[in-house]
Image: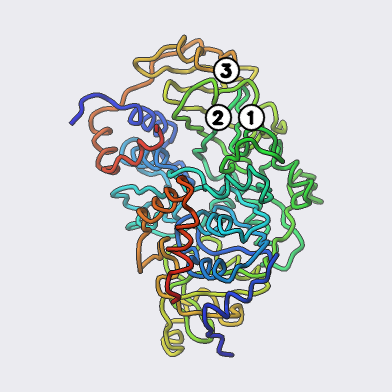
Amino acid sequence: MKKVLTSLEEAAKFIQDGDLVTFGGATFHRAPMEFVRELVRQGRKDLNLVDREPAMDFDLLIGAGCVAKVRTGMLAFEIFGMAPNFRKKSESGEITTKEGACQPIIAGFRAAAMGLPSLPVKGMLGSDLLEISEVIGSQKLMKDPFTGETMIAVRAIQPDVVVIHAQKGDEYGNVRIEGPFYEDVIKAKAAKRLVVTVEELIPNSQIRKKPEATTLPHFLVDAVVETPGGAYPCSCFNYYDVDYDHIKKYLKAAAEGRFEDYLDEQVYKRKRT
Amino acid sequence: MKEEIEISDLMIYAMASQIQNFDTVLHGVSSPLPILAMSVARKTHAPDMAYISGAEGVDPDLDRIYPSSFDVRLNRNAVAYFGLHEAFDLAQRGELNVMFLGAAQIDRHGNTNLSVIGDIDRPKVQLPGGAASAFLMPITPKVVIWVTRHSSRVFVEEVDFVTGQGYNTRPEECKKNELVVISNLGVMNFKNPGRVMQIQSYHPGHDVDEIKEKTGFDLLVAPDVSVTPVPGPEVIQLIRTIDPDDVRRTEFG
């Protein structure tokens, strides 16, 4: 085992301009928000983002000008409404949006995790989404060689970097996720490189006492950063709930044309952890 | 307390009625009404249903809902976690019985649009995206579409983009399942030879003419059209207990 503990600043450098990136969590839950804020502070550009149901993590990067392309099943702020920067920049053509659907996106991660070039899924037939994805080459019709059943082959999605925020980990990168996993384990295995920010650093001896609690063993993990509050304002199970008021403030700032002020206050001037 | 039955109560009750005992049901993102409908079904006529939360908890002891349908507190006292990819495996096996989905536009054949208004490459309005719609609509035995604002802008002659497949865009083998549309005015289904939308029931205070008038295509009327059943006081009380902050009302704007 090699020590992979590093700083947020160094870990963010794993991501290069133009990289294909996904994050752990789903909507407002366990998104690696402090890492996202660090990417904004470092001025990353032209990111190619993919996930099934992201929310503020993607919208913040889009609003800060870090993104060129987005592929999601749904990108919104749940009942609060549309993701404001996503909507604006997709309509103005500043970003390229290629909508997917949840299952094919997950299947793409699964294929990469299994070392396969593609994985078939059911459903999808008849949707216009299939046509646009055939154009970009992410999904194609196929016939099962045994039964002749028509299915959709989804091309593997192997992100250059996956970033996950977890509850606990040691300095070698043995990581514990508590509560719902979402597709984090699949994404971790699909990644070329994996960065994990954790609420709490725990000793390796503690990890060894309960190996069944380890979600990601060290050899999958390229960097660990101790980042308390690393999902804020999203939730981190067993540590804190979503700060819905903060999310409303974000939306209000975007709606009133004060998104730059939000970035100043909440990202650039925010103390690095 | 208000004696009057609210439209959200009526819709939730109609949605809950679509679930049968022993069904396996999943709710997705941004889904206060489906969560409440699943909770009502489980506490009334479907005590043995399997409830899979979008927050990943199975059969949680739901005491209240939150603005996020993935809020981890929705998993309170769950018996297990079951990830979305696992629920999707279940759907591919044909074992996810009921799914609730949304629509920004829907047409007479049941095609839904959650993607864009205008052209996909140059959208006039970028919509949030269909999430699981295109995957689940053709393969789930029963799909319930809920619409809180029934108007000719939502019920359109032709959707701008087919996100979720209606009966005319599906392959032959995917035409057997059931599609139900529950709006703030009535309940619609496709139980006729042409598999086009028809009014099955109208909510109290509304009628067939009003629904037809607020629909952008020629809506059929089921021969046995009737008034939508009204929830009893215990159901209404249950809804208010689980949703003390009126999260459900945000959907009605």
- The disc at residue A162 is none
Q: From the image, state whether disc 1 or disc 2 is nearer to you.
A: 1
Q: Residue at x 50, y 57 (%)?
A: A260
Q: Position of residue A234 (x, y in %)?
A: 42, 60
Q: Which residue is mark 1?
A: B166
Q: Residue at x 78, y 51 (%)?
A: A137
Q: Residues within 10 Å of mark 3 (few under 14, many from 20)?
A: some
Chain letter of the residue carrying label 2: B
Chain letter of the residue carrying label 1: B
Q: Residues within 10 Å of mark 2 (few under 14, many from 20)?
A: many
Q: Position of residue A175 (x, y in %)?
A: 50, 77
Contact flag, marks 3 and 2 (Cβ < 8 Å): no
Q: Secondary structure at mark 1?
A: loop
In this picture the colour scheme is: rainbow
What is the count of numbered marks? 3
Q: Residue at x 32, y 52 (%)?
A: B61
Q: Earlier in the sequence, mark 3 or mark 2?
A: 2
Q: What's under tag 2, amino acid-wise?
A: Leu
Which of these two is toward me, A247 or B44?
A: A247
Which of these two is toward me, B37 or A78?
A: A78
In the visual, does A253 lie left or right of A137? left
Q: Which residue is mark 3?
A: B216
Same-chain check, marks 1 and 3: yes
Which of these two is toward me, B4 or B249?
A: B249
Same-chain check, marks 1 and 2: yes
Q: What's the CA distance linking mark 1 and mark 2?
A: 9 Å
Is B141 drawn above or below residue B132 in the view shown?
above
Chain letter of the residue carrying label 3: B
Q: Residue at x 60, y 56 (%)?
A: A51
In the visual, does A255 lie left or right of A50? left
Same-chain check, marks 3 and 2: yes
